């Protein structure tokens, strides 16, 4: 409630009769157009299916590239698609020598982490030293902040065998593979 000393807040000008009529006419035209489109589609469906006319509409076919680009943008897959392209161009980005021994495994979009597996511990160490340079190069290509960290993993050892000749609680030979 406003006190008698405070002025009442001023409102914008009320729409006049002409403005109200324009708004009502526009709404009526849109409703009629929607009813007409629905009626025409029902009529075409009874005659043997919907047909495309001479003018472009939403049912017309589109090129595969534009359909994929539209799907990627609608679903918000721009960053994962760009990183997937980087994985395809990995030898160009890191060089042939590094690409022979290290390959990207997956990309965690939430953490913005690229996980790379190397075939030996020596190459894993080498890639860990190159990681800041690679992150900068990837962010140049993908856009700032697309990759925050490169997580380097060494070679996967053989499966652990449990049996009578194993000492309980042993961790195995450790990091001697590769």
Image (cartoon, rainbow, N blue to C red):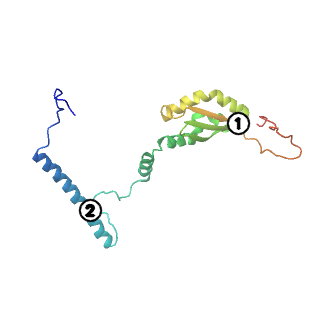
Residue under pointer 2: 37
Where does residue 39 sit, x and y in percent of width and height?
26, 66
Mark 2: which secondary structure?
helix
Q: Who comes first in sequence, dot 2 or dot 1? A: 2
Q: Nearer the viewer, residue 91 or 134?
A: 134
Please give the name of the residue rendered at 42% of the width and 52% of the height, measured from the top-left corner: 67
Instruction: From this view, report whether residue 120 is shown above or below residue 64.
Output: above
Give the position of the N terminus as an image quadrant. Answer: top left
Where does residue 18 sit, x and y in percent of width and height?
10, 47
The reply to whether callout 2 and callout 1 are in contact (CB within 8 Å) is: no
Residue furthest to the right in view is 165
Q: Quadrant of residue 172?
A: top right
Report whether 1 appears left or right of 52: left
Sort mark 2 into few (<14), some (14-19) or many (20+) by Cα contacts within 10 Å: few
Residue under pointer 1: 154
Tell me how far mark 2 sits from mark 1, CA to CA.
62 Å
Sort mark 1 into few (<14), some (14-19) or many (20+) by Cα contacts within 10 Å: some
Where does residue 149 sit, x and y in percent of width and height?
58, 32
Report whether 30 appears left or right of 136: left
Where does residue 37 sit, x and y in percent of width and height?
26, 62
Please give the name of the residue rendered at 56% of the width and 42% of the height, measured from the top-left corner: 88
Foreground: disc 2 or disc 1: 2
Instruction: From this view, report whether residue 72 is shown above or below residue 154.
Output: below
Instruction: From this view, report whether residue 34 is shown above or below residue 98.
Output: below
Give the position of the C terminus as an image quadrant. Answer: top right
Q: Quadrant of residue 119?
A: top right
């Amino acid at each position: 409630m406003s006190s008698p000393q405070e002025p009442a807040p001023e409102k914008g000008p009320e729409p006049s009769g002409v403005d109200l009529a324009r708004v009502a006419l526009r709404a009526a035209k849109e409703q009629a157009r929607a009813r007409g489109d629905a009626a025409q589609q029902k009529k075409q469906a009874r005659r043997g299916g919907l047909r495309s006319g001479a003018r472009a509409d939403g049912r017309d076919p589109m090129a595969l590239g534009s359909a994929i680009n539209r799907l990627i943008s609608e679903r918000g897959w721009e960053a994962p698609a760009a990183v997937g392209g980087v994985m395809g161009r990995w030898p160009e980005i890191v060089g042939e020598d590094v690409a022979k021994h290290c390959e990207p495994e997956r990309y965690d979009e939430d953490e913005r982490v690229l996980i790379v597996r190397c075939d030996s511990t020596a190459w894993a160490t080498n890639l860990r030293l190159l990681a800041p340079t690679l992150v900068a190069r990837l962010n140049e290509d993908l856009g700032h902040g697309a990759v925050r960290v490169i997580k380097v993993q060494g070679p996967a050892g053989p499966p652990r065998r449990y049996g009578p000749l194993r000492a309980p609680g042993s961790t195995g030979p450790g990091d001697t593979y590769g």
